[in-house]
Each structure stands twice: as C-alpha cells, then as structure tokens.
Image: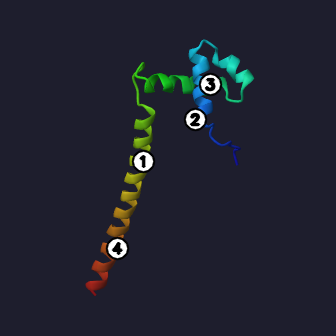
Amino acid sequence: MPRTRPAYPPEFRRQIVEMVRAGRSPEELAKEFEPSAQTIRTWASQDRVDAGERPGLTSDEKEELAQLRCEVKQLREEKEILRKATVFFVRETSR
C-alpha cells in the first residue's frame, strides 16, 4: 500500500508560492521545506492560471469538473440499476 501524507494546508501552499514569486527557486524551497520541487512548481503554475496569467482551468473549475464527473458516474450507476430493475419487472409480469 503506498504511503501518502495529508494535503498541505492552503496557507502553507500560498506562502510557498509567494516565495517562488519573490524569486526563490523551487529546488531551494524543497530543500528547506518538505514538498518536492516539482510539487512547488505545480503550485506556482496553478497560481498563475488562477491569477489569469496563464491559460488553463482554474482551481475552482477543476473542483467543479471533479464534482460533475462524480455526479455523472453516480447517475450512470443509478440508470443501470433502473434498467436492470425494468428488465426484471418486465420478465416477472409477463409470466
């Protein structure tokens, strides 16, 4: 089982991104703090998207997309259950 750690708090992420914007490199920050340099680059990149400086999906749009995907999955499962129930009841009533 892979080991995972809890997500970093938003305030911590914001402070790290501010340090990147101030000119510190992700590698330097990775040595000083726990997140990897790639994680810090990802946070900084997403911050630029959220600020409108780069094209892409904002954090809010990503969250909405994830929620919609979950909802679609649930609706598909419910539809499949109803389809199977319909087939069952059609067979039962035709006997």
For the residues labelled 2 and 4, the Cα–Cα distance comes to 45 Å
SS category of the residue bearing label 1: helix
Q: Is 51 situated above or below 94?
A: above
Q: Residues within 10 Å of mark 2 (few under 14, many from 20)?
A: few
What kind of residue is marked 1? Gln
Instruction: Name the residue tied to disc 3.
Output: 16
Q: Position of residue 85 (x, y in %)?
A: 34, 73
Q: Are marks 4 and 3 in contact (CB under 8 Å)?
A: no
Q: Position of residue 9 (x, y in %)?
A: 61, 37
**Mark with earlier residue (4, 1):** 1
Residue at the limit of the structure toward the bottom, as seen here:
95
Q: Nearer the viewer, mark 4 or mark 3?
A: 3
Q: Nearer the viewer, mark 1 or mark 3?
A: 3
**Mark with earlier residue (2, 4):** 2
**Mark with earlier residue (2, 1):** 2
What kind of residue is marked 4? Ala
**Mark with earlier residue (2, 3):** 2
Q: Are marks 1 and 3 in contact (CB under 8 Å)?
A: no
Q: Is 91 situated above or below 30?
A: below
Instruction: Name the residue tied to disc 2.
Output: 10
Instruction: Name the residue tied to disc 4.
Output: 85
For the residues labelled 2 and 3, the Cα–Cα distance comes to 10 Å
Q: Quadrant of residue 35?
A: top right
Instruction: Name the residue tied to disc 1.
Output: 67
What kind of residue is marked 2? Pro
Q: Position of residue 1 (x, y in %)?
A: 70, 49
Q: Residues within 10 Å of mark 1 (few under 14, many from 20)?
A: few
What kind of residue is marked 3? Ile
